[in-house]
Amino acid sequence: MNYFNLFCALLSFSIVYLGTPHLIRYLKKLGLEVKDQNKRDKPLIPLSGGLIVVAGVLVGVLVFIFFRTFIIQTKILTTENLIIVFASLLTISIITFVGFLDDLLVHKDKERSGGLNQWQKPFLTLFAAVPLMVINAGHEVMNLPFFGDINFGILYPIFFVPIGVIGAANMINILGGINGVETGMGIIYFGSLGLYAYINESYIAAMFALMIFSALIAFFYYNKFPAKIFPGDSLTYFLGGSLAVIAIVGNLEKAALIVSIPFILEFILKLRSKFKAQCYGEYINEKVKTNYKKYYSVIHFFTNSGKYTEKQIMYFMIGIEIFFSLLIWVI
């Protein structure tokens, strides 16, 4: 049984690994590029790598369903679970499309993506939550840190599901600006959540996490320092939406909250600047230094001094995520 899971994961990996170079060339032809702000000459880098990642995940999940339906039938893939899987795929696809719309709005000077307005982002991501809401996905009883088990009843699908999807997507989206950070951190928290879900017999959540984990490893090869392609909002929205999906369908809200602590801290810090501060800094003697005197991002704790290279900062951030992802096993 596990061999088929690994085959589907390898398929997701292969699609992303082999497809990304083609996407890079296509995005360059379209002119969908922005400047890499942390480099000396600020080269133009293609934007919206999330498109190939979601493609790899979709194919991997659909092949998984095919195997489970026609080759190795299992009680895990019941009609109810199939509905949950397809609703989850629809949620992920919609939220990735919203992120792609955000990527399309690039400034003429190519300095950065213009992006949707602050009110448009939560409004549009609300539609991504609808598939999970209408099927009453998830469990009404949530296990929360410090509070234990709480039964929310009908409030769970009509309130907590949309709040979870909107919050996760927009929260993951605000932490980035350094080559490889979004992808590298995603590898860590999806890998940890996938294993946690599997051990706790949340097999649908574990399957999604495995496909995403595999796709991100392939994409990291192109996104790590020095990046050949940027993830764009299509990937960060995808990551946030997928995190919410795994938390909801796997009843893993507590674990998802713990791995999200770096992003929660980022939200608090960005709030101090009214979400106007940028994570990236200025290239000075191969190091990255922020132009802000105060700390408006977790990344600013490393860029404020100007002592670290972009590559070092990337690994610092991944290290932070490793720490919080390990906490789910002890809390």
Image (cartoon, rainbow, N blue to C red):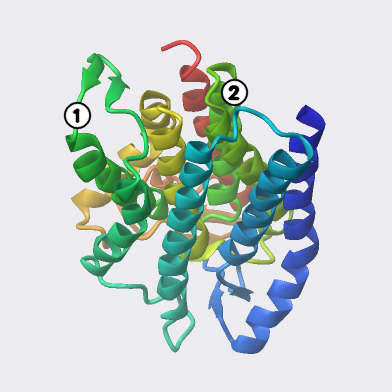
What amino acid does circle 1 point to?
Answer: Gly
Position in image of residue 249 (x %, y %): 43, 35
Position in image of residue 278 (x %, y %): 37, 60
Front disc: 2 or 1: 1
Position in image of residue 303 (x %, y %): 46, 48
Q: Left or right of 30: which side holds 237?
A: left
What amino acid does circle 2 point to?
Answer: Tyr
Q: Residue 262's quadrant in the figure? A: top left
Residue annotated with mark 1 = 153
Q: Nearer the viewer, residue 44 or 191?
A: 191
Whether residue 225 is visible here, answered yes or no, is no
Mark 2, residues whose alpha carbon is within 10 Å: few (<14), some, or many (≥20)? some
Give the position of the C terminus as an image quadrant.
top left
Q: Left or right of 53: which side holds 330?
A: left
Identified at 61% across, 87% down, the residue is 30
Q: Nearer the viewer, residue 218 or 309?
A: 218
Whether residue 182 is visible here, answered yes or no, is yes
